[in-house]
């Protein structure tokens, strides 16, 4: 195992003269099972051979994906815990922050607690994802984490009456438990079947049950509280709500136990390595170099930016209503009714929109439906600020909430494309990193929405201004400078901004190279031929020859492992300058900038009295800590390269860097070079000019 490259791509790798003629033992020679057993071990949840047509010919060939079905009972058992976990989460948040708080509703404290929950997820998400991908436990890679997350989450939720004095802390703990469960559950969803239709149906069911869980856990307590006004005391209602939470927890326990018992997981016998090589940096860089993942991630970030802005526009109205003091009981009842109607409109639109996109997916296919969803997000989001032009009445708020719910529905289409990108990563690297991709994709979505909402509230809503009417709010300085200080112009500008961002997201998604189910099947079958049978294959997307990695000496494997912390453009720039010291530049600059940023954010956190400013600074500081840690890790990698003698002089640096660039050819779309310096300008054109340096950054 020391002779194998502990690196990501299973591709062409220039070797030293000593190992040039060596032949690596193929993966198929080390497998303890035949090709006919491969599908049962790789995807045991699918009933292979359910259709007898050509099964006898297909089963003994790994060049095609055989026919099979994913039973509906398996899909339901798998998706049920996702919906119940969502119900428990919203019910627990409502009980702990809104009902059982002895000091009454505190909007600022709620914002800070939710920001702390997001910060905890940010700092631990990728670590747990890598732990799941690297695990070779006999019980599986996903099920132990699911059991841990569900167990501690249920324990925290049931113990809510004893934790009421710890304001906000139980919510953070429960968020971490939910995150552990979510990472393992999302990764297992991709592993159940290689058929894209199975994945889409499974992800659609998960999203539908999650919307139902939001209704059960978030809306039912609100409706119950409205009905209990005047019928029972607040303490009695808190006890009733806790009993409802215990019932949901029991259902979640049963559903999780059924999932762990009945849904099979991929055997660790089919994994190529006994542990995932590299570090978090190399995982992050590998995902950014995945050409099937990049356009999908950029499109999702832009879409969540527009959706977060729409939620900011809508949430400003509800925030003012919820945080205002209710001196008149009738006025307070009206405000509660408007808030409940708005939340119900959002939930109904979310569920109905999901059903509509499921129908569109069955008619148009996954990629076309996902592209249509991105395009339709533009007119849908236009309705959010347009609906509020008539004021903050019940009809306007419900229409705006319904439009926002429609824009959020159908996210399972993006996750189905993510599954195809994971398969393409497996083809190039030979590694199974479902949890890493799931965690990164989920974090990009959550962080974009959270930062957009928090920054938007900090810019448009002052803590002492709780009026739900935009016309009475004082616009910020930037709004005056742009000349759109009137309410109508503000709505018009917001509508154009949301529509433009949504259309740009659709343009990015249109560049995704995996657009048909046939391409996805070809990627899966090619990966099996490449890694299971040891064949030399061609990348079905970009027509590059993918050869087996030759045996490496431990020194070569160590150098390649350390260099995986750097992007190809950085390596090309250092090779063009004929000095590996250039690799210090980018991480050193990033570390210095993040240090300055963290210092400024700590001052904001220490002195601000505004909840939105505090939450925004808290989330930004979490991102700064992650960036600072990655920069230190990259600095440590180049320091070890120099200390261990891999880049001790100019000749050694040239050899190591050029071989690493050849190693990364499938990721940078270049033919195999004869001389390394001949293709450096093609990787990083005009690196000596300021424009080229900006392009590298």
Image (cartoon, rainbow, N blue to C red):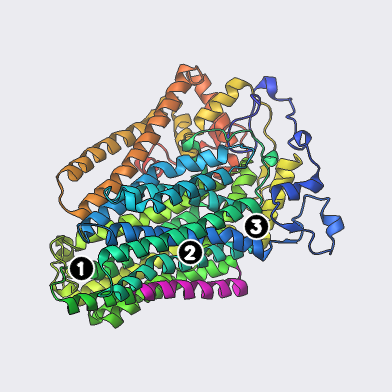
Q: Is residue 541 left or right of residue 372?
A: right
**Residue 408 visible in the snapshot:** no
Task: Measure the alpha-carbon separation of dots 3 and 1.
Answer: 48 Å
Q: Which mark is residue 210?
A: 2
Q: Which mark is residue 365?
A: none
The part of the chain drawn in magenta is 342-365
Image point (65%, 60%), residue name: 74
Q: Is residue 229 left or right of residue 15?
A: left
Q: Is residue 567 within the magenta segment?
A: no
x and y percentages locating residue 81 in the rendered image: 53, 58
Query: What residue is pinned by disc 3?
Result: 520
Task: Choose top left, top right, bottom left or bottom right for residue 674.
Answer: top right
Label 2 sits on a secondary structure element that is helix
Task: Measure the alpha-carbon separation of dots 1 and 2.
Answer: 28 Å
x and y percentages locating residue 230 in the rendered image: 25, 75
Task: Measure the alpha-carbon separation of dots 2 and 3.
Answer: 27 Å
Whichever of callouts 3 and 1 sits on the residue coming sooner in the sequence is: 1
Image point (27%, 68%), residue name: 313
Label 3 sits on a secondary structure element that is helix
Query: What residue is pinned by disc 1?
Result: 320
Nearest the viewer among 90 and 39 is 90
């Amino acid at each position: 195992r020391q002779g194998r490259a502990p690196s990501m791509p299973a591709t062409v790798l220039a070797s030293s003269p000593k190992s040039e003629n060596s032949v690596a033992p193929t993966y198929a020679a080390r497998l303890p099972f035949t090709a006919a057993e491969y599908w049962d071990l790789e995807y045991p949840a699918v009933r292979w051979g359910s259709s007898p047509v050509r099964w006898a010919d297909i089963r003994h060939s790994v060049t095609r994906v055989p026919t099979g079905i994913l039973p509906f009972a398996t899909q339901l058992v798998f998706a049920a815990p996702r919906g119940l976990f969502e119900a428990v989460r919203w019910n627990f948040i409502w009980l702990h922050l809104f009902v059982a708080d002895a000091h009454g509703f505190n909007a600022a404290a709620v914002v800070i607690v939710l920001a702390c929950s997001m910060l905890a997820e940010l700092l631990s998400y990728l670590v747990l994802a890598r732990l799941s991908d690297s695990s070779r436990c006999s019980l599986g890679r996903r099920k132990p984490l699911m059991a841990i997350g569900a167990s501690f989450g249920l324990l925290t939720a049931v113990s809510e009456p004893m934790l009421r004095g710890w304001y906000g802390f139980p919510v953070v703990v429960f968020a971490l438990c939910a995150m552990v469960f979510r990472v393992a559950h999302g990764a297992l969803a991709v592993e159940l079947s290689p058929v894209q239709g199975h994945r889409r149906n499974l992800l659609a069911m998960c999203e539908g049950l999650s919307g139902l869980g939001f209704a059960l856990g978030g809306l039912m307590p609100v409706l119950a509280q409205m009905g209990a006004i005047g019928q029972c005391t607040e303490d009695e209602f808190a006890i009733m709500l806790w009993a409802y939470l215990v019932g949901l927890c029991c259902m979640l326990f049963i559903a999780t136990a059924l999932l762990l018992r009945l849904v099979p997981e991929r055997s660790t016998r089919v994994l190529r390595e006994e542990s995932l090589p590299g570090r978090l940096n190399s995982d992050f860089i590998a995902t950014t170099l995945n050409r099937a993942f990049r356009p999908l991630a950029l499109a999702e970030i832009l879409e969540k930016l527009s959706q977060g802005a729409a939620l900011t526009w809508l949430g400003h109205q509800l925030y003012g209503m919820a945080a205002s003091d209710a001196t008149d009981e009738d006025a307070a009842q009206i405000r509660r009714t408007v808030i409940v109607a708005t939340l119900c409109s959002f939930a109904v639109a979310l569920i109905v929109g999901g059903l509509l996109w499921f129908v569109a997916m069955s008619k148009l296919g996954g990629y076309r439906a996902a592209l249509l969803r991105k395009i339709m997000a533009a007119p849908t989001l236009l309705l959010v600020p347009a609906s509020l032009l008539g004021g903050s009445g019940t009809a306007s708020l419900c229409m705006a909430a319904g439009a926002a719910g429609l824009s959020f529905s159908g996210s399972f289409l993006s996750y189905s494309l993510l599954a195809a990108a994971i398969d393409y990563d497996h083809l190039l690297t030979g590694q199974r990193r479902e949890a890493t991709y799931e965690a990164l994709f989920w974090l990009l979505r959550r962080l974009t929405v959270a930062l957009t909402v928090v920054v938007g509230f900090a810019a448009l809503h002052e803590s002492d201004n709780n009026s739900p009417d935009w016309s009475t709010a004082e616009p910020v300085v930037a709004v005056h400078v742009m000349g759109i200080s009137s309410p109508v112009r503000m709505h018009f500008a917001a509508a154009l901004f949301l529509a433009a961002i949504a259309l740009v997201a659709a343009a990015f998604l249109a560049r995704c190279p995996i657009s048909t189910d046939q391409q996805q099947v070809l990627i899966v079958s090619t990966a099996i031929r490449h890694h299971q049978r040891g064949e030399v294959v061609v990348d079905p997307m970009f027509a590059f020859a993918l050869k087996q990695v030759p045996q490496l000496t431990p020194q070569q494997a160590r150098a390649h492992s350390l260099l995986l912390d750097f992007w190809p453009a950085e390596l090309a720039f250092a090779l063009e300058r004929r000095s590996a010291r250039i690799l210090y530049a980018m991480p050193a600059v990033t570390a210095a900038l993040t240090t300055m940023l963290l210092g400024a954010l700590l001052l904001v956190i220490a002195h601000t009295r505004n909840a939105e400013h505090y939450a925004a600074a808290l989330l930004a500081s979490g991102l700064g800590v992650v960036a600072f840690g990655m920069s230190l890790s990259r600095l440590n990698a180049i320091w070890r390269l120099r200390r261990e003698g891999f880049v001790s002089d100019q000749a050694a640096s040239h050899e190591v860097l050029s071989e690493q660039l050849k190693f990364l050819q499938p990721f940078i779309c270049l033919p195999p070079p004869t001389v390394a310096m001949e293709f450096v300008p093609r990787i990083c054109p005009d690196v000596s000019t300021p424009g080229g340096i900006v392009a590298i950054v």
